[in-house]
């Protein structure tokens, strides 16, 4: 399912909203969530899961071409932890052949 | 302070003028459709934000960390999330600020 599929589904659910607004609403939600993570804020959606940042400490990496050691600086990466309802529903549906 | 469904609904109220009830319902349905897709084995690709995928995990031996008792962990299907390149890049660009704000310990 892509973003446009999701917009279609929500538009079908919400016939009182004009299509353009559904589109803007989906983009607005994703933007609000992205901005929160960029600012280091957690997102907690009950029944779905939570998004947060995980810290990756600085490490010694290697240039694969030359083999030279380089210091790779620390960074933060977005992380998602599925909530209970999502975990259970996804696991119960596992008779479906689908994967990724 | 974590961003919650109420905050997300508030964004729709303020940015698009949906009324509070509509905004709340919209947020609820947004996540419900994502759950439904994943439940039926479909990956969800939200460009610019990230992709939710599914992974089958084999059963493996586990242990109750408190009692040390062995309990098998059954095979299961789990959700994975990969942030988009764009989101990862934006977070990475903000590292100095985040380090200060989060005191080097993430979350």
Image (spheres, coloured by chain):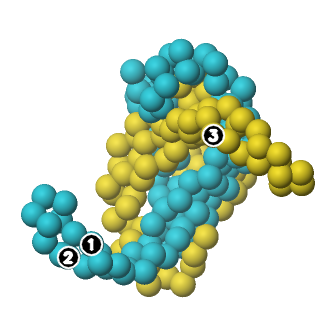
Q: Are marks 2 and 1 on the same chain?
A: yes
Q: Are marks 2 and 1 in contact (CB under 8 Å)?
A: yes
Q: Label 3 is found on which chain of the structure?
A: A
Asked if B19 appears above or below A52 in the picture, the reply is above
> In the drawing, does residue B76 fall left or right of residue B65?
right
Asked if A97 appears above or below A12 in the picture, the reply is below
Q: Quadrant of residue A75?
A: top right
Which residue is at the front of the view, A62 or A79?
A62
Q: Which residue is mark 2?
A: B71
What residue do we see at 39% from left, 71% from top? A91
Asked if B79 appears above or below B32 in the picture, the reply is below
State the SS at label 1: strand
**Residue B20 at x, y = what percent?**
44, 25
Q: Identify by letter the chain in yellow.
A: A
Res A77 seen here: yes
Which residue is at the front of the view, B37 or A20?
B37
The nearer-to-camera label among 3 and 1 is: 3
Q: Label 1 is found on which chain of the structure?
A: B
Q: Which residue is mark 3?
A: A59
Q: Residue furthest left?
A: B67
Picture colour for chain B? cyan
Mark 2 vs 1, N-terminal side:
1
Q: Which residue is mark 1?
A: B62
* Measured Cα–Cα span from mark 3 to mark 2: 36 Å
**Residue B67 at x, y = what percent?**
10, 63
């Amino acid at each position: 399912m892509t973003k446009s599929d999701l917009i279609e589904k929500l538009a079908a659910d919400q016939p009182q909203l004009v299509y353009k607004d559904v589109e803007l609403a989906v983009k607005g939600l994703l933007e609000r969530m992205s901005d929160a993570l960029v600012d280091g804020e957690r997102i907690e959606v009950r029944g779905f899961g939570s998004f947060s940042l995980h810290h990756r400490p600085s490490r010694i990496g290697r240039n694969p071409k030359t083999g030279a050691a380089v210091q790779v600086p620390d960074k933060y990466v977005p992380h998602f932890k599925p909530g209970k309802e999502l975990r259970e529903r996804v696991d119960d549906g596992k008779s479906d052949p689908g994967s990724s | 302070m974590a961003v919650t469904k109420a905050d997300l609904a508030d964004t729709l109220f303020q940015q698009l003028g949906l009324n509070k009830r509509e905004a709340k319902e919209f947020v609820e349905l947004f996540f419900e459709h994502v759950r439904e897709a994943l439940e039926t084995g479909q990956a969800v690709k939200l460009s610019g934000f990230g992709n939710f995928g599914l992974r089958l995990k084999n059963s493996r031996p586990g242990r109750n960390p408190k009692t040390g008792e062995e309990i098998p962990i059954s095979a299961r299907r789990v959700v994975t999330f990969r942030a988009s390149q764009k989101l990862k890049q934006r977070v990475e660009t903000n590292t100095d600020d985040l380090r200060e704000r989060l005191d080097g310990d993430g979350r």
